[in-house]
Amino acid sequence: MKRRNDRLVALVILGMVALNFPILSLFSREGVVFGIPLLFFYLFGFWLLFVLMIAMIVTRKSGEKP
Amino acid sequence: MSWIWLAPTISIAYLGVLFALAYHADRQAARGRSLVNNPIIYTLSIAIYCTSWTYYGSVGRAAMGGVGFLPIFLGPTLMAALWWLFLAKIITIAKVNHITSIADFISSRYGKSPALGGMVTLFVVIGVMPYIALQLKAVAVTLDVVSFLDEGIAVGPLPELWQDTALHIALLLALFAILFGTRHLDASERHEGMVMAVAFESLVKLSAFLLVGLFVTFVLFDGVEDLFGRAMQHPELRRLMSFDVVPGGYPSWFSMTFLAMLAIMFLPRQFQVLVVENLNREHVSQASWLFPLYLLAFNLFVLPIALAGRIIFMDGSVDPDTYVLALPIHGQQSWLAVCVYIGGLSAATSMVIVEVVAMSTMVSNDLILPMLLRFRSNFRDDLSGVILFLRRGIILGLLLLGYLYYRLIGESHTLVSIGMISFAAVAQFAPSILLGIYWTQASRRGAMGGLLAGFLVWGHTLLLSSFAQSGWIAHSFLTEGPWGIAWLKPHALFGLTLFDPVTHSVFWSMLANVGILVMVSLFDRQTAVEQIQALNFVNVFEQGAKGGDAYLWSGFVSVQSLKKLLARFVGPASAEAGFAQYFRQCDLKLDDSSQAPAHLVAFVEKHLTGAIGSASARVMISSVVSGEELDLQGVMRILDETSQVIEYSQRLELKSRQLEAATAQLQEANARLQELDRMKDEFLSTVSHELRTPLTAIRAFSEILHDNDDLPLQERHRFTAIIIKETRRLTRLVNQILDLAKIESGKMEWSVTEVDLPLLVQEAVDATRQLFDNKSVQLLNKVPDQTMMLWADRDKIIQVVINLLSNAVKFCDAQTGRVVIELRETEADLGVAVVDNGSGIPEEDLERVFEKFYQAQTDAIDLPLGTGLGLTICRKIIERHQGRIWAESGVGQGTAFIFLLPRQVQDPEDSGSP
């Protein structure tokens, strides 16, 4: 259980870093991926990845008590 | 058919459907078949986070600020990942303590303080009111848009009060909130019907929004690529795709993310659905990824819709906040517009209903009831009706207040900026709650100080400044500061001009809030109730953490009075059932007249807490418990008794540890004694054996001489020589045993004088010269002929040297043998080495040669037998002089016996005894 908590905290730290200055500024430039502007693509792509990672962490070994 | 009539009719019909759904869910719940007990419904109910602000406002903000709307949803996404840590703990605490609101949570944590609960409630009402006004505004504006579908969009001055759509909506929502939230009083404050309706609405608003998104992207445009491609042709819209257009830049992005992280937990409605309405803590883990997924889906089409709106309404004739509605109208899709309107209505109504229900619980339990009960704590009638009536009145009051705010302020602000004011307000609760559940030291005064400071800063930097912006107070408040004091300018406190207003406010209010909470707590002394509650909250997962508050009541009260008290607030049937269940659970058999045990009083208090809040419950209990509520001394006494028992047992433990240590020492001593005893026995048997050998020889030869008179003279001589030799050996042995015994018992006399070592060595050499000559062993004295003085017992040292020399000669071969005696000296020591070229000693025996009766294994048969005590005595003598003696050897390499004596030591004790 301790490990699951640690993983979640690490994930949130990763999210905070990836979704803030200066990482974010790297994507604030012209460019198109699959017809979608680079910044939009990065934000929504990371968002989806982040959600999938939460899902992966919490559904693994579920049913334990915190 | 006119839309003027159709749109309101559809609205009311939709709300009717919702109510039917809620009613059905409530009926099922009453029958024990919960419809909401699953993670999907739980997730959808959390989605009341997406209000009309999300629905219309996000597009409005995106149309002007690009991705600037996203932090409001990225924050909750980040926070959702931490739900399993924070939320699960908060839910457990709330369930254990029957907590039903944020105000209750904070007041309960900090010693069930009524003042704190009231303060939090007041702040919630002030802080969240703009948010409710915002929803009323959204519904009113969109209803007007839809109502005039046939005639185009009309934007006019504010209508007369009684014709104002917003007022009608406020009244209608009040009615529904009363129907959903206050149909009956329940100790757990759970409303399954409301949750069901809210979850359904979340589904409706998501579907409607996705529908618009698909329509705009694929009908008005030819897919994503076409839409973005056309937007990129306009330099102005092209800028929206970079970060440069985000208002406030990166600091604002960060502070909004931070605020949204806290808002998702501590907005009153979020706390209601996340904590109070939670049925199973396990749902949290599923919701922690399903909810961010919902948010992601909701925001997928925000940017496309915003860009499409900018392209289509290039002239700026349409307010970006209404693009969601205006685009279907532009596309001639009236029914789609109505769908959108219904979606927006869902977003607004679900938020308003849950928010005001949660707030009415707070206002009644933490603001009005404590005051009411304080003044008249001896109501004797059924109070549950009064409380319900009170709550209904509060709901109506809150919505009218929201309307008033909208009327006075709402017109001049965009949707997003109003919402952020509320976010910044509820963020002030985060320090007291999050620190409160992990840090036992956080104290009531600290929490009060922190909250007050945070809210004052918030009020000054955001609320009052928004009043100033809308012209409600003088604009010079903003530009020159209150009363012209420049460093109090609400957007540049102390001259800080780095940030946008929201970030600026968040920075100062959080600094004040956390700073004061921590500093005051560090220097504060908590009361007994505070300490017990702090431990209850922080250690909620630990076994036995609950029940500490059972000590808090020590007076006398009958079971019947408690039952009556509970019945007055939750109704007689529910009270009776609660008691019966508790009696079963604890295996209690009490009649109505018997005295209630402390834990029963605590149980009733908790049950009451659910109905009327912790602070009020406390007041009520103290009104029926005769005898004082346990004061600090009382609690300390109880704790003291407990701590005495603990101390006593600790002392016992210490004692038993000491006993164990003593036993171990005794055992050790015993083992040593046994060893000594064994050694003594061994010594005795060895000594007697050693004595018997020469005695046997003497006796045998004496008998031969005695019995055989006719022995030849030669034989006779030989035998007597043997007898003499053995007798000498016997004498020597006895002398040495006596010497050893004397040394060991400390009775040996020592006469320490200054002696000249080379002289002493020469004497020993002279004394043993004959031995060497007899065996033709060469003896070389290499000790230099010069004076070297040291303090020693002369005779004893000579004895040592003689002993070493005679040993050496014994183990040397005749003819080839060679013994060298040489000087050894170090800075501190002076000594002698006797080196032979005999057979040597195996390494493992180098120490053993000094043991008593050790006899070297040797092939030479004709050796004069030693006693086996010589080296032992040598060692004793040298050690007595504080010197060292040891042997160095290897088999076949000869042996060196070396002793060293300290140069300077003159033991006064030794010299004193001649």
Image (cartoon, rainbow, N blue to C red):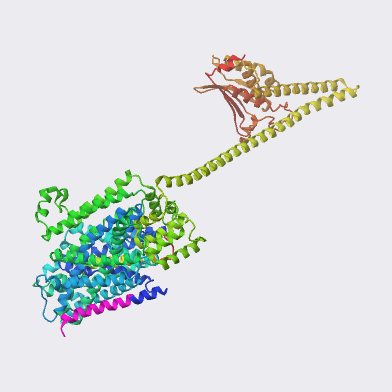
Residue numbers of the magenta segment: B1-22
* Image quarter (top left, top right, bottom left or bottom right) of the C terminus of chain B: top right
Would residue B914 appear left or right of B167 to someone viewing this image? right
Task: Indicate yes or no whether the magenta region holds residue B787.
Answer: no
- Residue situated furthest bottom in the rendering: B1
Residue situated in front as seen by the camera: A40 or B716: A40
Would residue B383 appear left or right of B334 to someone viewing this image? right
Give the image location of residue B312, x and y in percent. Answer: 12, 75
- Residue at x 11% of width, y 67% of height: B236
Q: Which of the 4 image quarters holds residue B186?
A: bottom left
Residue B705 in sight here = yes
The kind of secondary structure the magenta stretch mainly shows is helix
State the count of labels.
Answer: 0
Residue situated in front as seen by the camera: B868 or B366: B366
Q: Which of the 4 image quarters holds residue B308?
A: bottom left
Give the image location of residue B37, x and y in percent. Answer: 39, 71
Q: Which of the 4 image quarters holds residue A52?
A: bottom left
* Image quarter (top left, top right, bottom left or bottom right) of the N terminus of chain B: bottom left
Task: Indicate yes or no whether the magenta region holds residue B7.
Answer: yes
- Residue at x 9% of width, y 56% of height: B475
Would residue B367 appear left or right of B684 to someone viewing this image? left
Residue B228 in sight here = no
Above or below B112: residue B14 = below
- Residue at x 20% of width, y 52% of height: B457
Residue situated in front as seen by the camera: B526 or B911: B526
Residue situated in front as seen by the camera: B500 or B795: B500
Give the image location of residue B451, x and y in percent. Answer: 26, 52
Give the image location of residue B447, x and y in percent. Answer: 30, 51
